[in-house]
Amino acid sequence: MKPHRTLTVIALTASIVASVLLVAGCGSSQTSSTSTGTSDVVTSWTAGDAPWSTVVQSAKGQTVNWWLYGGDDRINAYIDDVVGPRAKQLGITINRVPVDDTATAVSKVVVEARAGKSSGGAVDLIWINGENFASGKQAQLWLGDSWATKLPNAVLHVDWSDPSINRDLGVAVDGQESPWSRAALVWAYDSARTTEPPRTLDALLTYAKRHPGRVTYPAPPDFTGSAFVRYVVTQLGEDRAFAYLKELKPYTWRQGSAYPKSEAELNQMFGNGTVDFAFSYDPSFVESAVRSGTFAKSARPFVPMSGTLTNVSYVTIPSNAAHPAAALVLANLLLDSDLQAKKADPAVLGVPTVLRDLATPAQHSQYLLANFGAPVPELAAAKVAPIEQRWKREVGS
Amino acid sequence: MLAVAAVPAVLVAGAIFDAARTSVTPGISGSVTLEAWRTFAGDPATVRDAGFTVWIAVASALCAAAGGVVLFSALRRMPRRVAFAVLLIPIAVPYVTAAVLTMQWLGADGLLTRLVQHGVYDPVGSSFGIGIIITYAWKEAAFIAAILLVGLTRDLEDRETISRTLGLSRSQVYWHVTLPSIARPLIVATTLVAAFAIGALEIPALVGGISPQTLPQTAAAATAGDVLAGQSVAAANSLLTLVVSIALTLALAAPLLTRRMRWSS
């Protein structure tokens, strides 16, 4: 065959293959279940027709594809070195899938749902809360039947009457996600540079005016930057909050013409002395940063006098998960008292527990706060995006 | 030629179809709505960001072209292997690494800033996209220079020699013989750089500012909040980016379509 004709044949063949792939992708085909038996066990258990032991038995030998934020090495180590071995004892393997944003995991589930993939999904478990959970709940992406309230450890240890647990940024959880971790917006200052940190918004504004360029925050929609803006809104109301942020702007770093893009960038700027404060939704971030050398040993955590934003984060199971039984067993394991106690240990993570009957370990680190003050509840999930967009229009531009 | 073009054409057509479908069917139910287009078109930042994207693409491409011509002129007399070895270094640097290098040197916390202590203009995060343009310029100048070197023939050198023999000065030879000879590959390479800069995300995401942003940045940001609605807005954004890219490519490549510079001539 002449080279020209060979090339033509190859190109046409490739075109046909590409077209077939496209048609298959555009269609709403129903893929066959890869774990019908497991799904039946889960359905039976949630309906109360089968005991928990059938779920545990069904989960043996399965691998849970757990998609979660992978930017915190301490959390990764906790999962790999503490949770993983315990899961192995139950016959489950954890495949930790790190993502830079939980929205990536939700997008994956959305794409599969659009394609009609009702089972065998790539995502078995997601560490999630807030808008991402709300979006998925609205689209009916999560496993239902109030599975989270029926987990054995949840029945024993979780106070589902606690509004901080049964509502996720104002959205009813309805048992579609299981609590895993608590968080509080904690600030950091360097005691070697700043004698007394500002503990009110007015004091922060005064500080910024006296020390121009020494205060900043990540630009929304960065998670931490958005949390700061939301905190101001919860304290002042939306309109006054934006008036405050606009008044603060010219005294911030680079006169507000630029903002750090992420918490990591803000931490670096704080660590090298470019700005005087950092903050994070991770209550143990000062401890982590001092250990890693990002912050000086003179760094200290603090919270505003009026309290700080707090929230609970959860794990949820997509309704098309390939390994729902194993995901349920893992979600239950995460509520184990021993694992929650280890998570709260400052030497491990220093993150508060979600269990009602677990005593908070004595804080033996000057880099961890024993008391976060009065908890300030988060704004409703539906308000977050509009506030971020308003910030971009009125403050960021 | 048509057969070879069929493969990418089919893939691109499929991607456009899927983007269009996603832009009008947010959610899972598949119901059609123009809400994403209304949100996207109604946002005053959309026109501003589209203009900013074009500015970044054109400025980056022109700066890279200027740098590429300078590199070409400096390296063309060297042995080819040496010249390409020099050009391979920036070409081989991944775009993310290039952006990080720009930040490390030119950022507010960068090495250059620390060396001179104060008063240095910080292009990273600039609202004019200076950091983005600088990054594309040094990264793509090598690519353009390599394209020009590949097209360099003995015919050009002979014509330059003859021109010098006939009494033209070096600058006259450069402007009237050398540059017209490399104009066609230069335009093609510059257009490629501009087209790439329109659609790329890494460099604007790392060294760009928060406002204005390029269209790819706003598309990525759209999915950070409400994933369902955001995917539709991002799809609408991507289609606009495609239109802008085609328009800009045709505009930059227009000289190639004129009678004097047709490929067939």
Image: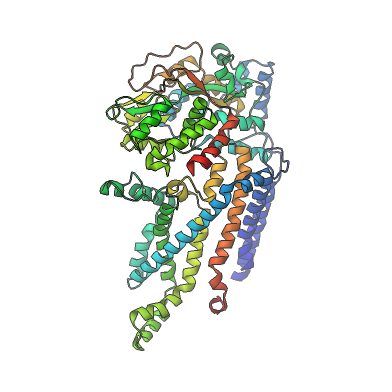
Q: Nearer the viewer, residue A18 or B231?
A: B231
The answer to whether residue A347 is above or below residue A263 is above
What colour scheme has been applied to the protein in the rendered image? rainbow
Image quadrant assignment for residue A321: top right
Q: Residue at x 35, y 67 (%)?
A: B83
Q: Nearer the viewer, residue B207 or A43?
A: B207
Image quadrant assignment for residue B133: bottom left
Q: Position of residue B41 (x, y in %)?
A: 63, 48
Residue A42 visible somewhere in the drawing: yes
The answer to whether residue A24 is above or below residue A173 is below
Q: Position of residue A74 (x, y in %)?
A: 40, 28
Q: Residue at x 53, y 54 (%)?
A: B199
State the residue lying farthest toward the bottom. B166
Residue A318 visible somewhere in the drawing: no
Location of the N terminus of chain A by quadrant is: bottom right
Q: Position of residue B230 (x, y in %)?
A: 60, 41
Residue A394 appears left or right of B25: left
Q: Position of residue A61 (x, y in %)?
A: 55, 27
